[in-house]
Amino acid sequence: MTIIDVDQEALPSETRVYRYLSIEGFDRFCNFGVSLTRISIWPDRLEASDFAFFVNAERFGDLRSKTNFFASCWTLEREHPAHFDCHDSYRLAQEELERDGSGSMWEAYCGQGGVRICTTLGKLDQALIKRLSKTENIYRGRVRYLASDDPRRVVGKNQLEEVLFYKRIGYRHEAEYRYVLHNSEEQSDYITAPIDDYYLFLDEILVFPLKDERTDAIANDLHSKGVSIATGPMIGTNMKDHRHFCRVSKLYGLASQRIGRVCFLTINK
């Protein structure tokens, strides 16, 4: 298998990438590993560049069906320095985003609860290489954000896969990094790459931010599952690289992070 970068300058293997997972998505990840999803089941038809896909398929004489393309979508969780007045403001904003996550992403992907997992491009590459056959190519790179009718989504492309690295401008906050694969043999809507050691594969697990006490039980359960990855046999405490391995986002306020007693904290005025 060959990993092909669509970016002119590939990001280094130690680059951190994040993925927001619903409760069901986190369970699937813990049971089966990293998943690539059939793009034809994505809910937004324009998000997957339908028009650009079919225009380019005809232009390239490519007879492959869109239903046989799969993708694994992550986020770089990164702001652009140009959006800030000075480097210190950018640094503080980036640190807070990495610490607590994006409000838009939590709401979009973890509305009923969920987690944000973190790993690196290098570890993702290795997991996918181990799972996929030697004949399959996988394309990876940053997603570009343009208006749905912007011709740059269509013109100047050399490979059909390239059109799957564009999304509508309304998704720009996702700062997405994507893996794309064509597979005509898979019958399921998911291709999964098993993880041999979750503690080694993951850099951290961040539980969704609590808004009130109604989600205490859900957050506590997710936190316990995350902690169990770090505190299993032969590992030890809920730590990795001198930081908590599994913790709770404080985007919406304070929360207890005591193992087995995660809960929303009310500040008495």
Image (spheres, helix red, strand yellow):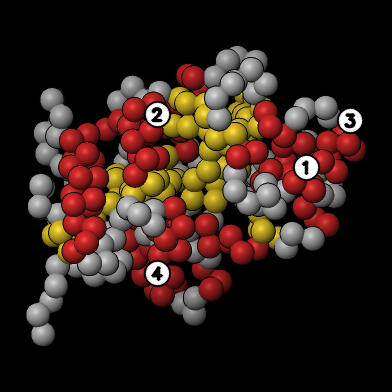
Q: Distance between the Cα atoms at labels 3 and 1?
A: 12 Å
Which corner quadrant of the image does residue 88 belong to?
A: bottom left
- Residue 148 x %, y %: 74, 59
Q: Dot 1: what SS? A: helix
Disc 1 marks a residue whose amino acid type is Phe
Mark earlier in primary sequence (1, 4): 1
Which amino acid, by three-letter code, is at mark 2? Gly
State the residue position of label 2: 33
Q: Mark 4 or 3, which is nearer the eye?
A: 3
According to the image, label 1 marks what residue? 53
Q: Is residue 99 above or below residue 60?
A: below
Q: Is residue 114 left or right of residue 256?
A: right
Q: How far from the left and from the top, in percent, is residue 45?
A: 68, 49
Residue 231 sits above or below residue 2 on the image:
below
**Residue identified by numbered label 4:** 93
Residue at image location 85% in from the left, 50% down from the top: 155
Q: Which corner quadrant of the image does residue 269 belong to? A: bottom left
Tell which circle, 4 or 2, labels the residue nearer the N-terminal end.
2
The percent position of residue 168, horizontal first and vertical second, equals 67, 59
The kind of residue tagged 3 is: Gly
